[in-house]
Amino acid sequence: MPNIGKSTLFNALTKSYAAPAENFPFCTINPNIGIVDVKDSRVDKLAEMSQSKKKIYSSIEFVDIAGLVKWASKGEWLGNKFLSHIREVDAIVQVLRYFKDSEVVHVEWVIDPMRDVEIINTELIFADLEIIERNLWNLAKKVKMGKGNKDEVRLVEILMEIQTALIQWKIAHNIKDKLTKDDEKLIKSYNFLTTKPIVYAINIGQDDIPFAHEIANEFMEKLQSPVAIVCAKLESEMMDMGDEEKDEFIREMLDIDKVKHIPTLNDLIKLGFEKVGLMYYFTTGEDETRSWTIPIGSTAPQAAGAIHTDFEKGFIKAEVVKYDDLVTYGSWTKAKEKWLVKLEGKEYIVQDGDIMIFKFNV
């Protein structure tokens, strides 16, 4: 919704001032897009161990759109236009305002994150119902008359299932979990908003940081979903600091040494990455240490294809060692001596954090 710190969060994530963040609704009109590194301490550790000249993290793209209000799906404050900006994304981050600030007025006047979730989800539901209503009737008529092919018959079944969920005011992303890859291809062109994974970012105030863990548990229970806790205002003020410097700064400023985990933007980035269904494996050496992005469940040849399509086509074998094993013994050679480096074939399912060397022939 407007005035919840969404553009401030986007700027902090992308370490830029690309998105206007002002104390009035709808200061963002056109979408802002930024690419963000998915920081992983394992990359840092491997780069240090291999004495790599450079390190390359995986990345994720964030799109910042204007805040939505009631009846956004019907065009209120250009809401339908703003919704169209995110139809192509893989997952949605809903930023929920938890912080209190009398100088930043909420458009609904009272701070209530769960009410905001209901408003936004309602608008997503309305927007998707409109798409189904535009397409389902003619398609169902064609199938009923016996003129539809096998794919169209199945498509009608899927659309009706999604429609049933939406009419019951349920977000439909759980339905997507039941769909096969062929089913997903059938509905891909519709770009439904409610079938996308949703990540909830709870935007807290500076004084709330010591209680971040309790706040996270509260909203995980209410939303039945993982959440990320962020303090967008503070993060924007620490934009030029490194992760360790930020952590030390917050602990000193708030005198909260006893807090085990201080919420950071990396929590949100990693959660977004996981929700999209991605993971990464590593390659490491003197030239570079790098994380490679692949879908969860990828085989070794598919992982090789992330580097170059020729690697996948000519895949022979892959040498694989687990991150913990490599770090424990300090080098590839020593891990190999302990029989911890495995030779894997085409059927091997890559695990998050594997370190790999590919053998291929082209």
Image (tube, helix red, strand yellow):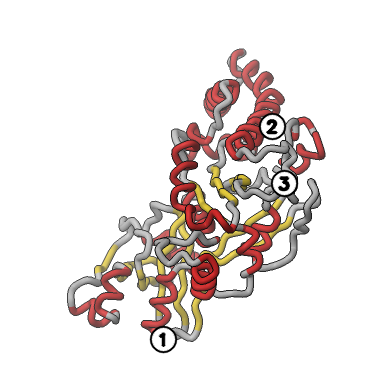
Crowding near pointer 1: few (<14 within 10 Å), some, many (20+)? Answer: some
Query: What label does residue 184 carry, if any?
Result: none
> The N terminus lies in which quarter of the figure?
top right
User: Which numbered disc flags the more N-terminal residue, 3 or 2?
Assistant: 3
Compared to residue 348, the image places residue 95 above or below, namely above
Q: Quadrant of residue 155?
A: top right
Relative image position of residue 73 (x, y in whole percent): 73, 33
Instruction: Tell me if residue 149 can be seen.
Output: no
Q: Quadrant of residue 114?
A: top right
User: Which numbered disc flags the more N-terminal residue, 1 or 3?
Assistant: 1
Crowding near pointer 2: few (<14 within 10 Å), some, many (20+)? Answer: many
Q: Which residue is mark 1?
A: 51
Residue at image location 48% in from the left, 57% down from the top: 210
Q: Secondary structure at mark 1?
A: loop
Q: Are marks 1 and 2 in contact (CB under 8 Å)?
A: no
Instruction: Tell me if residue 127 can be seen.
Output: yes
Q: Secondary structure at mark 3?
A: loop
Query: What label does residue 85 carry, if any?
Result: 3
Q: Tell me the kind of residue under disc 2.
A: Ala
Relative image position of residue 319 (x, y in whole percent): 30, 71
Q: Which residue is mark 2?
A: 127
User: Which numbered disc flags the more N-terminal residue, 1 or 2?
Assistant: 1
